[in-house]
Amino acid sequence: MSSTSKLNNKTNHPATVPPPAQPQKWPAGMLKMDMLISELSVQGRLALPMVVMNLAWFGKAAITTAFLGRLGELSLAGGAIGFMFANVTGFSVLNGLCGAMEAICGQAQALAFHIPINIVLSKTMGLIGVSMAVWITDLIIVVLLAIYVVILENTKGNRWKDGGWWDQSFMDWIRLVKLGGSCSLNTCLEWWCYEILVLLTGHLKNAKEAVGVLAIVLNLDYLFFSVMLSLGTCVSTRVSNELGANQAGNAYRSAFVSLALGFILGWIGSLLMVAVRGSWAALFSHDNGIIKGVKKTMLLMALTEVFNFPLAVCGGIVRGTARPWLGMYSNLGGFYFLALPLGVILAFKFHHGLVGFFIGLNAGIVICLMMDLVFIVRLNWVKEASKAQTLVSDHQVQNVPKYDAEELSTVQANHEV
């Protein structure tokens, strides 16, 4: 073949253009075993102090419920309704506003006062005494936290205004209120669903026994929730910090480790709930009807824990990407458009009682988890890190000091000197 024909063949068959590269969602090589173990160690150091603190807080509610159960079936049901009102109007709102800003000091110390106060007041004043023990313990917590803050600030040279909230601009406060409002509403939607279940249980046949059963079952769930809350706060902190540092791979790895840990702990919590269902009710009541009801209901609650743990982690990941409103929408759809309507139909129309409520609750939690997982799987971590850098850069530009002509000349002169 001549050189001319070879040239014509090359001209007639141009080189194929390679397909465009797919956008990178996270840096490669971020899931190596040594990296995963290192991330697990970091999260363990962050989460363990929060687990201790949250266990102390939610353990206070379990201890109070145990004293109420000793006073009788009616006191147990009444105490459950009282806790419901406090959660709806106070604790859920404040917990959502606080977000990841939890104080480790104070609450575990106050728990040491709660048990003896409960013993004394419940023996002398009955139901009113148990209620008084709750607010007295909460008051001790507030005082201890206030003392802790004062001592901490004094050790830093009493710089109360140095870089604190007084130095923030009006727009900084607006952004904080928007973010805190979304986090608060997200938490409220989840907590209020459980409290609405308590309220609806009061309309079942033999309401006193049913509400008592639900209160005892939820108290064990509260103890598990202390671990869920700590894990969610931990992953929220890790993801937000890594995205702010423009480390998309580290943020992705943090989310992966926490989510895997959430699924594992979900099964562990479920098996533990099944294992203790025969003895848990006896800690709160000696009524045979309540004990049998708790044994039956805890089987369904054990299934709930399988999905509750990863759901809490997903909520932390969503908050870490500064999108708490996504969790708000998933909670609204799963809990209020599915869980509560389905539970009401099964409980009242088909006469399944508490079993119907928990079937609806489990269905709603599964939907919430699926919606959050879809968002997390589709998340572009590299893009999220870039967004975080843009937000940080805008904030830094806003904080650059502005000088007039005379001040600028003075600054330049000082710099030359």
Image (cartoon, grey):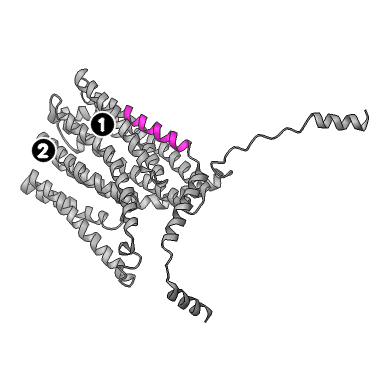
Instruction: Rate crowding at label 1 as few (under 14), some (14 to 19) or many (20 or more) other CA atoms within 10 Å.
Output: some
Residue found farthest to the left: 125
Q: Image point 23% across, 60% down: which residue?
A: 144
The location of residue 180, given as percent across then percent down, is 31, 49
Comparing 325 with 255, the one in front is 325
Q: Amino acid at mark 2?
A: Ser
Span colored in magenta: 363-377
The location of residue 47, given as percent across then percent down, is 38, 49
Residue picked out by circle 2: 75
Sequence-first tag of 1 and 2 = 2
Q: Amino acid at mark 1?
A: Gly
For marks 1 and 2, give the CA distance. Answer: 22 Å
Comparing 279 with 249, the one in front is 249
Q: In which quadrant is the N terminus drawn? A: top right
The location of residue 354, given as percent across then percent down, is 22, 26
Relative to 81, say whether 122 is above or below. below
Q: Which mark is residue 343?
A: none
| Dot in front, 1 or 2 | 2
- In the image, residue 345 lies in the stretch drawn in magenta: no
Q: Does residue 142 show up?
A: yes
Residue found farthest to the bottom: 417
Q: Does residue 272 show up?
A: no
Q: Image point 51% across, 52% down: which residue?
A: 246
Horizontal arrangement in the rendering, residue 299 relative to residue 286 (left or right)? right
Residue picked out by circle 1: 278
